[in-house]
Image (cartoon, helix red, strand yellow):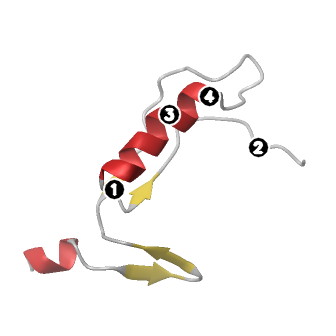
Amino acid sequence: MMADLFSEFSVGNMKARNRLMMSPMSQNSGTAEGEATSWHMVHYGSRAVGGCGIVLMEDTAVSQA
């Protein structure tokens, strides 16, 4: 049902406010080392504030830190 699209749900200990998901898009905007930048914080943060329950980030590196 369409109502389910906007209902809250959980996966493990992660809770999402709805079932809308923004898929990752490779915009090649990370640093040469593959790190996220302030651009990512603004871009993806605005999508989350805009209503997406889950936002998947583009290709970036994983750090042990």
| N-term mark: 2 or 1 | 1
* Residue occupied by mark 1: 52
Give the Cα separation between the discs numbered 2 and 1.
23 Å
Would you identify the image quadrant in which residue 5 lies? bottom left
Tag 3 secondary structure? helix
Q: Residue at x 89, y 48 (%)?
A: 64
The kind of residue on which mark 2 rests is: Val
Which circle's residue, 1 or 3, is located before the other in the chain?
Answer: 3
Q: Residue furthest right?
A: 65
> How far separated are the C-alphas under marks 3 and 4?
6 Å
Q: Looking at the picture, how far across and down is residue 27, in whole percent? A: 47, 23
Left/right of residue 37 with respect to residue 29 in the rendered view? right
> Which of the pair 57/46 is nearer the observer?
46
Residue holding disc 3: 42
Badge nearest the viewer, 4 or 1:
4
Is 52 placed above or below 16 here?
above
Nearer to us of marks 2 and 3 is 3
- 9 to the left or right of 36: left
Contact between marks 2 and 4 (CB within 8 A): the answer is no
The residue under label 2 is 62
**Marks 4 and 1, Cα distance to the nearest angstrom?**
20 Å
In the rendered image, the residue lying farthest to the top is 32
* 43, 5: nearer the viewer: 43
**Disc 2 to disc 4, how far (Cα)?**
17 Å
Residue at image position (30%, 56%) is 51
Residue mark closest to the camera, 2 vs 1: 1
Would you say the residues marked 3 and 4 are in contact, meaning their CB atoms lie under 8 Å apart? yes
- Residue that numbered label 4 is attached to: 38
Please identify, in this view, whether the residue under mark 1 or under mark 3 is nearer the observer.
3
Q: Which mark is residue 30?
A: none
Q: Which kind of residue does numbered mark 3 sit on? A: Val
Measure the alpha-carbon separation of dots 1 and 3.
14 Å
